[in-house]
Image: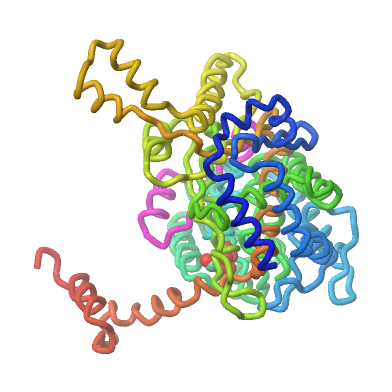
C-alpha cells in the first residue's frame, strides 16, 4: 500500500502546478473525466487529476481490495469488526433479495417490518389511526444523529411529494428545541415518534418524557399517541408504547445508515408508502451500480478516489458540499454525520495508528446562499477547499423556471470561476478601464486577483425526486465505504462519541449540587461556578 501512496504523492508533486483550465483545452477531457449512471452525471474534469493520476488512484483502490470488501458487505459478513456486526443497511432497500446473516435469512423480518410500517402509514394518513382529536395533522419525530438527520433531510428534500401530516424534528436536548416545536401544535392531533436505535440516548429519552408530559395535559391516554422506532423492544415497552406501534430493526443497521428502514417512518408518513418505496428504489439502483460498474465508471468509487486525492494526497483538509437546490439544505449536515462519524478515526481496523489522515471535514450550505457568505474564502482564501456542487436540470415550479435557470447558471459560474480565476493582468486591465493608474491601480488590482485552479466536482441529476434522492444518499454512503476501505479503518463504529457522553453523565450531579466538582480541572470548575452562580449574582 505504502508504495501506492508514495507514488501518488510523487505524481502530485510533479503535476500540482498544472492548470485545470489548460487541461480542459483537451476536447475529450470532460468526457474522459466524468461518469454517468442512468441520468446522473458526475463531472470531475475540473479537478487537477490527470490520466496517470486517475490510473494510480484506481490501482490504489484495487490494492485495497475494495471490490472484495464491497461484496463481503453486501453478503452480510461481519465487516464492522470492532462491534462484531454485519453492515446491511442495503438490505433495507432491496426487499426482494434474500440476505443470510449468521446462517439466518434476515429478509422475512425486514419485509414484515416494512409491511407493518406501510400499513401504519396508510392508516394514519387515511385517519383510520387517529389521535384523541381526530386525524393526525402533525408528527413529531424525536431522535438525534442518525435517528434525526436522515428523515429530517429527506423530508425537506421531498417537500413537493409530501401529502401527509406535517413533520417536525426534535433532536437537541436544549429544551428550547422541543418547546418551540410543540408550541404551535395541538396535542390531540399530534403523533410522536420516538426514534432511537438504542432507546437510551439521553437527549431523545429526555425529549420523549417532555413530549409525554405535554401530551398528558390534554390527552387522556398519551402513550396511545406515541410510536417508537428502536432495536430495543423491552425499553419501548417500559416507556409504555404498545408493541403494535413499535418498529424494530437489527443491530446491523448503523444509526447514520438507518433512514431506509423504520427510522424513515416520519418520511413515509409524509410522502406515503409508494413515495418511500421510490426512495428505496433509488438507493437499490445505486447499490446495483456500485456492485456492477467497473471502477473507472463507478460513481461511488470515483467520488471516493477524488476525495482521497484532495484530502490525503493534496492535503486539503476540508471539502464543501454545495447543493444548488434549496430543498437539499440539510444534506451537508446529513453528510457531516455520515462522513465524519464514519471516517473520523485515528486507527486502522487492527488498532495500529493510521498511516494517512482520516476523512475530511465536511461542511456546506445551499447555493446561492453560500455565495453571499463564505465563497469569498473559497475563491481568495489562502487554503484550497475542494468544492462538490450538486445541481438539478429541472425544478418543481414550472412557473418559476426562470429562477431555476438563474440558480444553475450560478452553479456553473462558480465552478468556472474557481477553475479560471482572474490574473493580475486581467484585474489590472479592468481597473485601468475604470480610470485607476499608478500605485493605486496596482493595489486595487491585487485585491481583485483570483488565483483560480481550485478544484470542484459537479453531480448533476435530472430532478430531485424520491428516486434520485435515494441515489444521492446511497452514492455518498458507498463513497464513505470505499474511502474507509482504502484508509483501512472501520467506517461503522463511533467510539469517538463515547467519552463526552460519559463525562456529561458525571457532570449532571455536579450541576444539580448533588456532587462536588473538586476532582475537576480548574477550567471546568470555573465554568461550573459560573453556571451555578445565582442569576445577576
Ligand atoms: O452520536 C452517536 C450516535 O450513536 C449516532 O451514531 C446515532 O445516530 C445517534 O447517536 C443516536 O443514537 P440512537 O438512535 O441510539 O438514539
Q: Residue at x 64, y 69 (%)?
A: 489
Image position, residue 128 (x, y; %)? 70, 46
User: Is 103 rendered above or below residue 27?
Assistant: below
**Near-viewer residue (232 or 102):** 102
Q: Residue at x 55, y 26 (%)?
A: 412
Residue 163 located within the stretch drawn in magenta: yes
Q: Residue at x 74, y 37 (%)?
A: 35
Ligand 1 falls in quadrant: bottom right
Q: How is the image coloured?
A: rainbow
Image position, residue 169 (x, y; %)? 51, 50
Image position, residue 314 (x, y; %)? 54, 52
User: Is 152 rendered above or below residue 499?
Assistant: above
Magenta residues (range): 157-185
Q: Residue at x 86, y 62 (%)?
A: 107
- The quadrant the N terminus occupies is bottom right
**Near-viewer residue (520 or 173):** 520
**Residue 299 vs residue 213: left or right?**
right
Query: Quick check: can you spot residue 322?
Result: yes
**Near-viewer residue (275 or 127):** 275
Query: Quick check: can you spot residue 230?
Result: no
- The quadrant the C terminus occupies is bottom left
Q: Residue furthest front?
A: 14
**Near-viewer residue (124 or 414):** 414
- Quadrant of the rendered image containing residue 339: bottom right
Image position, residue 273 (x, y; %)? 75, 44
**Residue 524 vs residue 332: left or right?**
left
User: Is 104 rendered above or below residue 126?
Assistant: below
Residue 290 located within the stretch drawn in magenta: no
Amino acid at each position: 500500500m505504502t508504495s501506492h501512496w508514495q507514488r501518488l504523492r510523487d505524481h502530485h508533486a510533479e503535476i500540482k502546478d498544472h492548470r485545470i483550465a489548460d487541461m480542459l483545452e483537451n476536447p475529450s477531457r470532460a468526457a474522459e473525466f466524468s461518469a454517468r449512471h442512468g441520468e446522473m452525471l458526475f463531472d470531475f474534469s475540473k479537478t487537477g487529476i490527470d490520466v496517470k493520476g486517475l490510473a494510480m488512484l484506481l490501482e490504489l483502490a484495487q490494492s485495497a481490495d475494495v471490490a472484495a470488501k464491497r461484496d463481503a458487505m453486501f453478503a452480510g459478513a461481519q465487516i464492522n469488526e470492532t462491534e462484531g456486526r454485519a453492515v446491511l443497511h442495503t438490505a433495507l432497500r432491496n426487499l426482494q433479495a434474500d440476505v443470510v446473516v449468521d446462517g439466518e435469512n434476515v429478509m422475512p423480518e425486514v419485509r414484515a417490518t416494512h409491511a407493518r410500517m406501510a400499513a401504519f402509514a396508510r392508516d394514519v394518513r387515511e385517519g383510520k389511526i387517529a389521535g384523541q382529536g381526530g386525524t393526525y395533522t402533525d408528527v413529531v419525530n424525536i431522535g438525534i444523529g442518525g435517528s434525526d438527520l436522515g428523515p429530517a433531510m429527506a423530508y425537506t428534500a421531498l417537500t413537493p411529494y409530501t401529502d401527509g401530516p406535517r413533520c417536525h424534528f426534535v433532536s437537541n436536548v436544549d429544551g428550547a428545541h422541543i418547546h418551540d416545536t410543540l408550541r404551535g401544535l395541538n396535542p390531540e392531533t399530534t403523533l410522536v415518534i420516538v426514534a432511537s436505535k438504542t432507546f437510551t440516548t439521553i437527549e431523545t429519552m429526555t425529549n420523549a418524557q417532555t413530549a409525554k408530559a405535554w401530551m398528558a395535559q390534554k390527552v387522556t391516554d398519551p402513550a396511545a399517541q406515541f410510536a417508537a422506532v428502536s432495536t430495543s423492544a423491552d425499553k419501548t415497552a417500559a416507556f409504555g408504547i404498545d408493541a403494535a406501534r413499535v418498529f424494530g430493526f437489527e443491530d446491523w443497521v448503523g444509526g447514520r445508515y438507518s433512514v431506509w428502514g423504520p427510522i424513515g417512518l416520519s418520511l413515509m408518513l409524509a410522502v406515503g408508502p409508494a413515495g418511500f418505496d421510490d426512495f428505496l428504489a433509488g438507493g437499490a439502483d445505486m447499490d446495483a451500480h456500485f456492485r456492477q460498474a467497473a471502477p473507472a465508471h463507478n460513481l461511488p468509487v470515483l467520488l471516493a478516489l477524488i476525495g482521497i486525492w484532495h484530502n490525503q494526497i493534496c492535503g486539503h483538509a476540508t471539502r464543501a458540499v454545495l447543493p444548488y437546490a434549496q430543498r437539499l439544505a440539510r444534506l451537508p449536515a446529513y453528510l457531516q454525520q455520515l462522513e465524519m462519524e464514519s471516517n473520523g478515526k485515528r486507527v486502522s481496523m487492527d488498532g495500529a495508528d493510521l498511516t494517512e489522515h482520516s476523512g475530511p471535514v465536511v461542511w456546506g450550505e445551499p447555493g446561492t446562499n453560500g455565495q453571499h457568505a463564505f465563497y469569498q474564502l473559497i475563491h481568495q482564501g489562502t487554503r484550497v477547499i475542494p468544492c462538490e456542487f450538486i445541481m438539478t436540470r429541472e425544478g418543481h415550479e414550472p412557473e418559476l423556471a426562470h429562477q431555476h435557470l438563474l440558480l444553475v447558471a450560478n452553479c456553473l459560474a462558480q465552478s468556472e470561476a474557481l477553475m479560471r480565476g482572474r490574473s493580475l493582468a486581467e484585474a489590472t486591465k479592468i481597473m485601468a478601464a475604470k480610470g485607476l493608474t499608478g500605485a493605486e491601480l496596482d493595489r486595487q488590482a491585487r485585491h481583485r486577483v483570483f488565483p483560480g485552479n481550485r478544484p470542484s466536482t459537479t453531480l448533476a441529476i435530472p430532478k430531485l425526486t424520491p428516486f434520485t434522492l435515494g441515489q444521492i444518499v446511497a452514492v455518498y454512503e458507498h463513497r464513505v465505504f470505499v474511502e474507509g476501505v482504502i484508509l483501512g479503518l472501520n467506517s461503522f463504529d463511533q467510539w469517538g462519541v463515547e467519552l463526552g457522553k460519559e463525562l456529561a453523565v458525571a457532570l449532571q450531579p455536579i450541576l444539580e449540587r448533588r456532587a462536588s466538582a473538586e476532582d475537576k480541572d480548574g477550567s471546568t470548575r470555573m465554568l461550573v461556578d459560573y453556571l451555578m452562580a445565582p442569576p445577576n449574582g
